[in-house]
Amino acid sequence: MHSQRRSDTPMAAYQVNPDRSTKPVGIKKICCIGAGYVGGPTSAVIASKNPDIQVTVVDYNRERIEAWQTDDLPIYEPGLLEVVKFARDGNLTKRTPNLFFSTDVDRCIAEAELILLSVNTPTKSLGRGAGHASELSYLESAVRKIGEVAESNKIIVEKSTVPCRAADTLRDVLVATAKPGLHFEILSNPEFLAEGTAIRNLLNPDRILIGSLKTPRGLEAAQALAAVYGAWVDPDRIITINLYSSELAKLAANALLAQRISSVNALSAMCESVGADIDEVSYAIGLDKRIGSRMLKASVGFGGSCFRKDILSLAYIAESLHLFEVADYWRSIVDINEYQKDRFTRRIVRCLYNSLSGKTLAVFGFAYKKDTGDTRETAAITVIDNVLTEGANVRIYDPLVKETQIRHELKNTTARLDCAEKQLTVCESAYEACTGADAVIILTEWDEFSNQGEPVRRDSGHGRKTEERAGRKVDWARVAALMRRPMFVFDGRNIVDAGALEGLGFRVECIGKA
Ligand code: NAD
Ligand code: UGA
């Protein structure tokens, strides 16, 4: 009785994978459902490090699966193509291929002992909780499929980011849909990779979190998954904790990371008024080891598919628990992010003599951060919408993002209107974007936009544009020659040396600098 109570405490629940040499217990086949930014790279790394395990990534999106089978992968990540080719193309590497991509969801589920759920969990758009809660229907449908086709016991792993106690929902669906006598052990194994550095993060993770029920079967399943990671991750970085702690820890980690950015962005507004420099303030506070220097870079606002949705999900959970002050606290992180995007646009309007009508703005960067082609929730959507509403002509250049994707992202904004559609041009180069422009607005911190640091180095493997432009940086003197006077640069990422640009005749406005 006494030991039972002890094992429920957080400290007693914490344990490390004791033996790195442990081989995957019975795991010979893994099926990953969802061939996106998480499922693809994670499966590729698992396969590359576990030659004895067959890893198949399935998705009902045929186009995506077909792209994963080529060298023009559906997503761009530095180093991804090399890892995929290594595990997938045994004929080239003299290694037996063990990474596959398929739309045959039923067969792959039926054959696997361990299933990674890597499907999307966006914010709900309809009904109760719309705009706040997580949409679990993709997860539910994947799990229904498992229940329907499974003929043997399986370990089901939540890699998708989920609300607290989602595991109970999944178990309930499985119990109701699966054949009697089968056992499904549900684990939480949230993914912490950041886009643009996914392969580096996966190969050298800060930690691997595995949440399980503290039952013998739960612990055994956790050890089986730990052994898969044990092929390349130090045992002291693989921690097993309570299932529900693991689910909550993922939401909490994203909330705290985003909270740092919103804190710095809130300070950036003060810097602009008191004559302080946010880069110096971030540097100074980051030297405190308790704070640390990462995720303290002021910007036009954070984007990406997860920060906003995960914070809103956390706030919604708090509200469901009647913890209204807690919900307000988390939501304020998103509020500051919206404020930052609006504040940046207002500064552009103010500097351009309070009217953008008939003026041309060159936008450098559309992706939500550098080294990715992902544009979900990018700050560029809000800023471009705002300046289109003010009547500006907008000429966008991004080294990786295609025109169709940019127009798709803007389709629910002002740009959907016929008049705004005509105000919008997507350009093939920075120079084309700048021709006749009154201002350059930097929205993504692509290395090539900076006028300082090393020449750009980027690996090939995703599209023609990337290969062609590797090694090139924008020539700001050439940009100056193409623009109308006076010429402004609004640096939403603080990546330019303002003094050097002022020497070329630009008026430069940076975030958090007077
Ligand atoms: P994504 O949209 O890129 O990929 C999800 C894929 O799942 C899509 O290709 C979709 O077609 C497929 N899918 C959905 N339902 C399916 C079903 N029932 N059967 C088969 N395929 C199905 O999403 P993502 O960015 O990879 O994110 C996946 C999850 O991981 C989310 O919960 C997200 O919060 C979390 N996450 C994402 C990141 C990131 O950097 N993108 C990092 C950590 C965690
Ligand atoms: C983030 C987390 O960093 C990952 O750990 C997590 O796994 C992931 O979300 C997820 O759950 O999806 P990601 O969104 O890919 O990863 O990228 P980040 O590097 O965190 O950047 C997010 C946004 O914040 C970007 O728009 C970035 O430009 C911005 N940012 C980041 C800043 O404005 N300042 C910073 O100091 C850091």
Image (cartoon, rainbow, N blue to C red):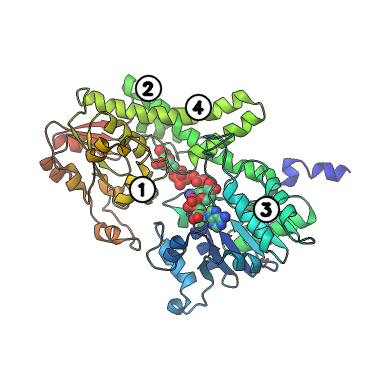
Q: Does any atom of ligand 2 lie closer than 8 Å to the CB of label 1? A: yes
Q: Amino acid at mark 1?
A: Lys
Kindly state the secondary structure of the residue where label 1 is placed. loop
For label 2, the residue is 270
Kindly state the secondary structure of the residue where label 3 is placed. strand
Kindly state the secondary structure of the residue where label 2 is placed. helix
**In the shown orientation, is residue 224 left or right of residue 45?**
right
- 1 vs 2, front mark: 1
**Residue 486 placed where, x, y %?**
13, 31
- Answer above or below: position of 163 versus 44: above
**Residue 162 placed where, x, y %?**
60, 44
**Residue 318 placed where, x, y %?**
62, 31
Residue drawn at 61 percent across, 55 percent down: 142
**Residue 388 in sight here:** yes
**Residue 190 in sight here:** no
For label 1, count other residues whose C-alpha is less than 10 Å away and answer few (under 14), some (14-19) or many (20+). Answer: many
Marks 1/2: CA distance? 27 Å
For label 4, the residue is 332
For label 4, count other residues whose C-alpha is less than 10 Å away and answer few (under 14), some (14-19) or many (20+). Answer: some
- What mark, if any, has residue 187 been given in the picture? 3
Q: Quadrant of the C terminus?
A: top left
Q: Which of the pair 295/152 is nearer the observer? A: 152
For label 1, the residue is 370
Q: Earlier in the sequence, mark 1 or mark 4?
A: 4
Q: Which of the pair 442/406 is nearer the observer? A: 406
